[in-house]
Amino acid sequence: MRLTVGCRGKMRDGQSENGKFKVVVKVYGESEFVGNGLKFATRETAEEYGRDLSSRWTAVEKWKVLDA
């Protein structure tokens, strides 16, 4: 668990520097991660979306949440 301070531009847990997160996926047979432009207000919401997406797409090899 990442523990950070919430003042003067520093991040709190579950927050990015600019307040947005995105999900990127890597599918079997491809070498790079790609995303779709959706942005989420919290890391938890982005993680929920990533889990849901990977359960529906059969070709997802990996997925991750990044600061948007």
Image: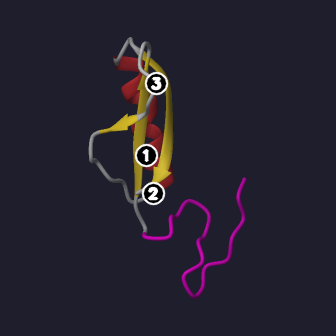
Q: Mark 1: which amino acid?
A: Ala
| Mark 2 touches mark 3? (CB < 8 Å) | no
Residue at x-position 50% and y-position 64%: 16
Pointers 2 and 1 in contact (C-beta within 8 Å):
yes
Which residue reaches farthest front? 31
Magenta stretch? 1-18
Indicate whether residue 11 is drawn in magenta.
Answer: yes
How would you rate the neighbour count of disc 2 (Cα within 10 Å): few for under 14, some for 14-19, many for 20 or more?
some
Question: Is label 3 or label 1 in front?
Answer: 3
Q: How many numbered marks are there?
A: 3
Q: Which residue is mark 2?
A: 42
Q: How far, Cα to Cα, is label 2 from label 1?
A: 6 Å
Q: Where is residue 11 drawn, in percent x and y?
A: 59, 72
Name the residue carrying label 3.
31
Point out residue 39 in the picture as x, y percentages from the top left corner. Answer: 32, 53
User: In terms of secondary structure, where does tag 2 sit?
Assistant: loop
Q: Earlier in the sequence, mark 3 or mark 1?
A: 3
From the viewer's perspective, tell me whether residue 67 is left or right of residue 37.
right
Residue 25 lies, in percent from the top left, at 42, 31
Majority secondary structure of the magenta segment? Answer: loop
Q: Which residue is mark 1?
A: 46
Q: Is residue 54 magenta?
A: no
Report the amino acid beneath label 3: Ser
Check disc 2 and give the amino acid type.
Thr
